[in-house]
Image (cartoon, rainbow, N blue to C red):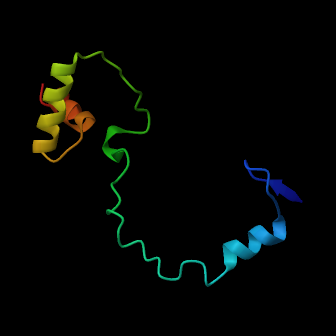
Amino acid sequence: MNWTAANGTTYTDEQIEQWATAQETEPEYTGSHLAPSKPGRPVTIGKNAQPFTIRLDEARRNKITALAKKMNTTPSGLVRDLIDAM
């Protein structure tokens, strides 16, 4: 099968397979410049969790974001913790 790039250049499946398996393709790439991955959504919120959206003005959003950063959590995690504390 042939594939066409946005600039009009065509490539074959064989060419793409060679690129994907070539050992000489960026052998110096280590990924060390990448930051550590962050965990996804916490399991503690349960399987049946549903999104809950609220509208906040910029000042309120900034307060939540700043406090979450100070507490080393996410804005969503901070709001969940606040609700749990009620």
In the rendered structure, the answer to whether residue 61 lies left or right of residue 86 reads right
Please tell me which residue lies in front, 15 or 48. 15
- All told, the count of numbered labels is 0
User: Could you tell me residue 77's position as x and y percent?
Assistant: 24, 38
In depth, the one of 25 and 9 nearer the eye is 9
User: Split into 4 quadrants, where in the image is the C terminus?
Assistant: top left
**Percent from the top left, x then y, of residue 45?**
33, 38
Residue occupying the far right of the picture: 1
Which of 71 and 23 lies nearest the eye of the viewer? 23
- Which residue is painted at 73% across and 47% down in the image? 6
Q: Nearer the viewer, residue 35 or 49?
A: 35
Residue 48, above or below 56:
below
Q: Is residue 9 left or right of residue 43?
A: right
Q: Residue at x 62, y 84 (%)?
A: 23
Q: Is residue 22 above or below residue 53?
A: below
Judge from the rendering whether residue 24 lies leftward or rightward of residue 71; answer left or right: right
Q: Position of residue 84 (x, y in %)?
A: 18, 31
Q: Quadrant of the N terminus?
A: bottom right
Residue in view at x 87 percent, y 58 percent: 2
Question: Which image quarter: residue 3?
Answer: bottom right
| Vertical relation: 73 (above or below) 25 | above
